[in-house]
Image (cartoon, coloured by chain):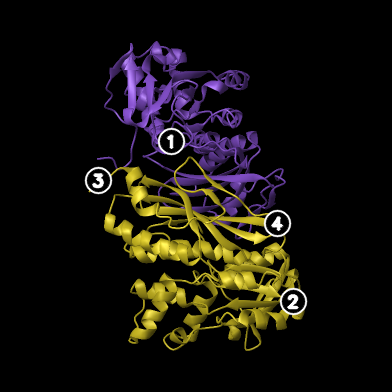
Chain colours: A yellow, B purple
Amino acid sequence: MACGEFELIARYFDRVTSSRRDVEKGIGDDCALLSVPEKQSLAISTDTLVAGVHFLADIHPADLGYKALAVNLSDLAAMGADPAWLTLALTLPNVDESWLESFSDSLFELLDYYDMQLIGGDTTRGPLSMTLGIHGLVPQGRALRRSGARIGDWIYVTGTLGDSAAGLALLLGQAELSDPAAHEALLKRHLRPIPRILQGQALRDLATSAIDISDGLISDLGHVLKASDCGARINLDALPLSEPLKQNFSSEQCLHWALSGGEDYELCFTVPEINRGALDVALGYLGVPFTCIGQMGPQSEGLVLLQDDRVVEFNHKGFDHFGS
Amino acid sequence: MACGEFELIARYFDRVTSSRRDVEKGIGDDCALLSVPEKQSLAISTDTLVAGVHFLADIHPADLGYKALAVNLSDLAAMGADPAWLTLALTLPNVDESWLESFSDSLFELLDYYDMQLIGGDTTRGPLSMTLGIHGLVPQGRALRRSGARIGDWIYVTGTLGDSAAGLALLLGQAELSDPAAHEALLKRHLRPIPRILQGQALRDLATSAIDISDGLISDLGHVLKASDCGARINLDALPLSEPLKQNFSSEQCLHWALSGGEDYELCFTVPEINRGALDVALGYLGVPFTCIGQMGPQSEGLVLLQDDRVVEFNHKGFDHFGS
């Protein structure tokens, strides 16, 4: 069924039930109009997802609607920001109403969960892809950055690493598991990553730096090292691995995925010795494990990986578009 | 030559020479951090441009870099907002350095002209397209909206209408002109539209509604009528047409393009009788013509088109994606 662009947008995306108080004008004019409270900074990030590049072309639209927003929320989490508004630019090859309904239902469920509001967007015809613009608020001067880590700070990650890469391998048929519960668990970690919003906010006054792990621990920690002019020592034996991962794959495979699999959407952050006690309390309440995996060192040492207290080499890098 | 994604981004897009004071952190972290001054509202808009849909696949990258930003600026103009920050999500089929250089040079030239700053983005591999997120500032309560027009308000447009559609016809080889100056002028109107930023700001306290003409006068004025619960009478004889258009095309063709050609990126706005004198002064200074083309009427009358004081029908609508 063909229907006009504006009608289509209205039907699936203009469904604000209760408007946020900071939204003066949402969807329906040339721009949205927003008010930012005093003493708050605005955090803005944008991400594009292209079919066949960032997600499988046959992904279920409900999974896509969830994940597209979740990976953008993860960027807010890494700054310690509170989610506020979303713009969605959606490019579709055709109008498939059941696809749109499933995609938008899933997107709005997650928007509502975080008390966010869709404030605008664009619908165009073309190869399936989307760009989300996410906006959050953070008290002035308290945002987490990549650049604040100091020598001696302890390096932590939330949750477990490598599950998402294993889930992708299962999706692609590159691996098979006889245990259906483990299969489901790893698939879910790939398709429905949970952005660490609460953790990011709890870290505001405790962590000296933070980043979310989207390209893989080595690649993303590398950004922190560069921004903070530091090196780091990582204890590979300490990397947190889930039971479904450990029990079904070789330790070498687990390590590979944990270091460079990507799409974990966990936070990697640094904490000075003096804040470790407060950290245990603040993150302990939130129910998601967090693990110390190493310590920041001098820049001259670079990134050192230790296994059984011995230095090891690792040749795989995180995913890098246009990589040679 | 292949190069890494981050290197590529750094080389062509991370070239801020002087940072705006309201940018706490620009490119280079998970989010940009911005501060919005007190008593200012934030205006946000997002637009996607897809090769083969919104621009010809063989467009010169300098024209594309200009126009992608200009059409987004036009949305800010329609709100009376002052341009501030841009996010750019760019999807490229491959790395073509001369293309990137030309595109980004042109984009940054326009950014600099409006004292804007690129605060973030994303570069991905895929079919050529881009999504821009534009952010502007407007004093609280003074933004122009589509919804404020009242019965009796006079309807104006800036500049001339239909030139862009004629320029596109020339580009596509659907029309030919023997006059090279007229050819150039119309082409330029299509490739290098000038966003009416100054006009929008000057209209803040004078106009009761405003919109930019991107889909064609009839389509866009229709949004104003709907949002303002009004009808309108448009005097077709008053539509402002440029000399290159009038002298080279039939009056029927000119009218068609002026009403529904789209991509004019002029402002259509409404002004109450009492503000007309102030309008003449405020816009007169800015050097771009502006023309009264009709008057708002009761909603029950709908949109009435008059030619030689007689009602005429017009069957062509503005461009509507997914239209049946």
Identified by mark 4, the residue type is: Lys
Category of crowding for the residue at label 4, using alpha-carbon neighbours closer than 10 angstroms: few (below 14), some (14–19), many (at least 20) = some
Is residue B62 or residue B138 the one in the foreground? B138
What residue did someone put label 4 on?
Answer: A39
Could you say whether the residue bearing mark 1 is in a helix, strand or loop?
helix
Estimate the x, y position of residue B92 in percent, counting from the top left: 46, 48
Residue A167 relative to residue B120: left or right: left
What residue did someone put label 3 on?
Answer: A2
Query: Closer to the N terminus: mark 2 or mark 3?
Result: 3
What residue did someone put label 2 on?
Answer: A272
Task: Give the distance between the C-alpha atoms of the residues marked 2 and 1, in whole angstroms.
Answer: 57 Å
In percent of the image, x 43 and y 71: which residue is there? A192
**Circles 3 and 4 on the same subunit:** yes
Category of crowding for the residue at label 2, using alpha-carbon neighbours closer than 10 angstroms: few (below 14), some (14–19), many (at least 20) = some
Residue B228 image label: 1
Chain of the residue under label 2: A
Estimate the x, y position of residue A250 in percent, counting from the top left: 45, 86
Identified by mark 1, the residue type is: Ser
Which quarter shows the C terminus of chain B? Answer: top left
Identified by mark 2, the residue type is: Pro
